[in-house]
Amino acid sequence: MEKTVKVSKPFMDDLKHTAFLWRKSRLTMIGSAIILVFLLMAAFAPLIAPYDPVQQNLQIKLQAPSWQHLFGTDQFGRDIFSRVIMGSRIALWIIFLVSVISGSIGIIVGVTAGYFGGIVDEVLMRITDMFLAFPSLVLAMAFAAMLGPNLTNTIIAISVVTWTTYARLSRAEATKVKSQPYIEAIRAAGGGNLRIMFLHVLPMCISPVLVQLTLRMGTIILTAASLGFLGLGVQPPTPEWGAMVSDGRNYLIDQWWISTFPGIFIAFVVLGFNLLGDGIRDMLDPRLRR
Amino acid sequence: MAETLIKIRNLKTYFPVKKSIFSKKLFVKAVDNVNMDVPKGSTFAVVGESGSGKTTLARTVLRLIEPTSGEIEFDGKNILELKGKDLLEVRRNMQIVFQDPYNSLHPRKLIKNIIGEGMKIHFKISDIEIRDRIAAVLKEVGLIDDHMYRYAHEFSGGQRQRIAFARAMVLKPKFIVLDEPTSALDVSVQAMVLKMLKEIKVQESLTYMFITHNLSLVDYIADKVAVMYVGEVVEMGDKTTIFNHPSHPYTDLLMASNPVPDPKFVREKRLLKGEIPSSINPPSGCRFHNRCPFADERCEREEPELREIKPGHFVRCHYPL
Ligand SMILES: Nc1ncnc2c1ncn2[C@@H]1O[C@H](COP(=O)(O)OP(=O)(O)O)[C@@H](O)[C@H]1O
Ligand code: SF4
Ligand SMILES: [Mg+2]
């Protein structure tokens, strides 16, 4: 018998090399650190937040930052630090659900179009193009306004405008994969279209879509915050960062802390996701790999 | 005479080619008017240069692509008319091992799932039984049962072809197409894989269609040979007949240009000259006339038929040797 090829677990080698590239890029590490802090913040929010984020107390309204209220209080006397901390959960929830929903829609549409080709592909891709023809924030605003402003609808509106990227990506992958002999072998074994599409072609589309999803997470937060700011997103008293920035609009000169702190958090988390996303993209770039 | 397992009649598989919108529709005549009888229990070799339509023929016979016209019978059933359950049963009985070992196993699936997929489709058996059968078939093809928990990239080319063969075998088919199964392998590995294929064929009373461009392999493994040239069968018959008395000038030249290691087979070395014509616009008359040393004006004008010059020996030539 011919000898087994000595493979020192290429997957592990790959992982090590990825870790090496990750350590080499300072910006990627900074991005990862920011996201780690963000995740921990969301995980332990109720333990970190000293006050109830929605409890009003007009006696202490509009207080400047102090040791009692690190980020001060807003016009209803709510502790901004607590609201910002609890807001991380809202942001994370939006990112998670939007990623799951838009990723699933995108993969299913893309794989169907790519696998069947022809007229199915033509129709599905024209629909995708229609969504791509509008600036995504404008389209999200339109959907949010149509559906009514709340958390669920924010998630739906953002999902509806972001699935197109994943659809195009999966379509390209499915088109490539469907004519491979390993797919034809399943047809030869008697596998039908649905089996081949979902059990064999689709799994090949998951990793490029996942990478793209992480690249897009910053944009998701930013869109959610924009909707919140415009009053088309999550409604008060829910501590959503965009809505909080909007809350402080009228007090910007004298009580700058109301808008500033949630604003800083938005900026940092978006920055974190973008740095991490860029890092991941570079790490996967075959030209930079070995 | 053995029973016929596969009967192919006037089979044509054309692929449309997109030229400019103004020119008339063109086709790649990948398989053109092929007739073949594959006897039960035989190893039927299909020989030809790259692009002569061997893979397309195999894919059409397995109904992985639809033919343009013609008939294919498997075990007495016209498979082009089958649907649903009947088609599924015929599919189980006809399997294939592809040429490229590096693309024929799913890169993200365990060998267990690659081999087990067909069983899940066809057999109502438990996961444990599926696993046991996989272990058995892996042993049969010269691997070990632990290999089922690995991915394709952990194996060499030869091992991958063994796995692909196991995937075919595990469905207990009657017929397996081996599409240049060893052309991507080292010579030493090639010999071992061929030996295994030959042994298992006898054990399991299989019928093979063995596709290759290498005549030495044909000599080693085949009983019957069909020589293809630009989509057509130009000569067909028993291996001994074809090897001892090649009657089509193309077969003759193939034999002459094939290096035979055995010194008693040393022939004068004559080489195939010229380009293989395109199957989009095959030459008029005999498709071989631009390369044939015996071509005359009739060959350019009139297309020869596949004629039976002796019982069981078919040649497509006006002037068989
Ligand atoms: N799916 C396809 N679409 C268009 N042309 C094809 C397709 N498959 C094969 N061909 C063409 O058909 C001819 C025969 O190819 P093939 O059957 O692969 O030959 P072989 O296996 O003998 O090398 C070639 O000219 C090839 O380009
Ligand atoms: S028909 Fe003529 S050109 Fe064709 S192979 Fe025979 S002799 Fe040669
Ligand atoms: Mg081929």
Image (cartoon, coloured by chain):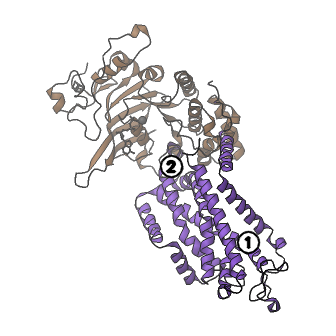
Chain colours: A purple, B brown
Q: Which residue is mark 1?
A: A89
Residue at left offset 51%, top offset 60% = A110
Q: Nearer the viewer, residue A164 or A30?
A: A30
Query: Is B148 above or below relative to A71?
Result: above
Residue at left offset 45%, top offset 42% = B62
Report the residue that reaches farthest toward the left: B297
Q: Quadrant of ligand 1?
A: top left
Q: Chain of mark 1?
A: A
Q: Nearer the viewer, residue A18 or B303?
A: A18
Query: Is B116 above or below relative to A39?
Result: above
Residue at left offset 29%, top offset 20% = B247
Q: Which residue is mark 2?
A: A177
Residue B316 place in picture, x, y as percent = 27, 28
Q: Quadrant of the C terminus of chain A?
A: top right
Q: Quadrant of the N terminus of chain A?
A: top right
Residue at left offset 58%, top offset 67% = A102
Residue kind at label 1, given as amino acid type = Arg
Residue A213 place in picture, x, y as percent = 60, 61
Residue kind at label 2, given as amino acid type = Val
Mark closest to the chain's N terminus, 2 or 1: 1
- Depth check, mark 2 against mark 1: the one in front is 1
Give the secondary structure at mark 2. helix
Please tell me the numbered disc located at residue A110: none
Mark 2 vs mark 1, CA separation in Å: 38 Å
